[in-house]
Image (cartoon, rainbow, N blue to C red):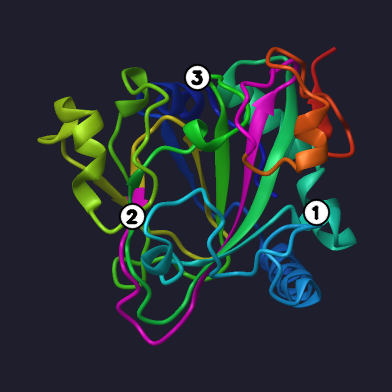
Amino acid sequence: MNSLLTAFQIESYRENGYLLIENFLNESELTFWREAVTEAMEERQGRKMPGSDVMVGGDDGINKDSDYFARVFDQMLNLWQTNDKIKQIMLDNKLGKMVADLAGWEGTRIWHDQALVKRPWANPTSWHLDTPFWSFSDRRALSVWVALDDATLENGCLYFIPGSFNSTTFENPGIGKNMDAIFDFYPQFIHSKSVAVPMKAGSCSFHNGLTIHGAGANMTNGFRRAMTCAYMPDGATFNGIKNILTDDQVSKLQIGDKLCDDSQNPLIYSRT
């Protein structure tokens, strides 16, 4: 794993809200990640999350226009909780340190991982933010997005609006049919230039959860697979949003309580 960050890369991330890292995984690591994700998804038998009866493509109550969203990508979350190989991958403290260095915090906890698979001819992923979906509110929160197949202009690579995280808030249109819905919330970016970030399999990008981003349609007859993970700082507190938490977990939380359950949000790196 190419886990060493330069000062230039950290500065670029903090200026733009995203960072591409070429050749993040070597060939053997990429093979392991691919096999682990395939195995973990097959074990789920279509269930989106552990302990949930919501199936891939079903209405999870989070994203708008559920029929359209079901044709954007297949999504399975917290595979680390049900597959030991994914657990080995996601709990790697080298990843946790990279995240801490980019975000500028002291300790890194996993919020959730997710496999994202654009099927052949899949719909585009409309412009959106990540952090407003989550059960904590922190402007530094971020995700890693690892390409398991080449992500190209033709099959749905990521796009970002550089620097947008500096002035977005926690309002979010969700992922729906209209690519431009985000600009109803953030009209100051309607004339901004977006940046496409195609990448070879084994490369990755990091992006701030308040960076406006999306992905193109899959205009090919092949799959575009990615493995991602969202991170939060150690000490993050519950904001009242359920997101991936179970009803039982939410019932035991008050707004302002720390999200520090290692069985749900493991601490994978600490500077102390």
Image quadrant assignment for residue 231: top right
Name the residue beneath numbered marker 3. 139
Q: Is residue 229 magenta?
A: yes
Quick check: marks 3 and 2 in contact, CB under 8 Å?
Answer: no
Residue at 60%, 69% (x, y): give it: 56
Q: Residues within 10 Å of mark 3 (few under 14, many from 20)?
A: some
Q: Is residue 268 magenta?
A: no
The mark that comes first in sequence, 3 or 2, is: 3
Name the residue beneath numbered marker 1. 80
Quick check: marks 3 and 1 in contact, CB under 8 Å?
Answer: no
Q: CA distance from mark 3 to mark 2?
A: 23 Å
Q: Is residue 265 visible?
A: no
> At label 1, which amino acid type do we have?
Trp
Name the residue beneath numbered marker 2. 176
* Side of 225 relative to 47 (left or right): left
Q: What is the magenta range?
A: 214-242
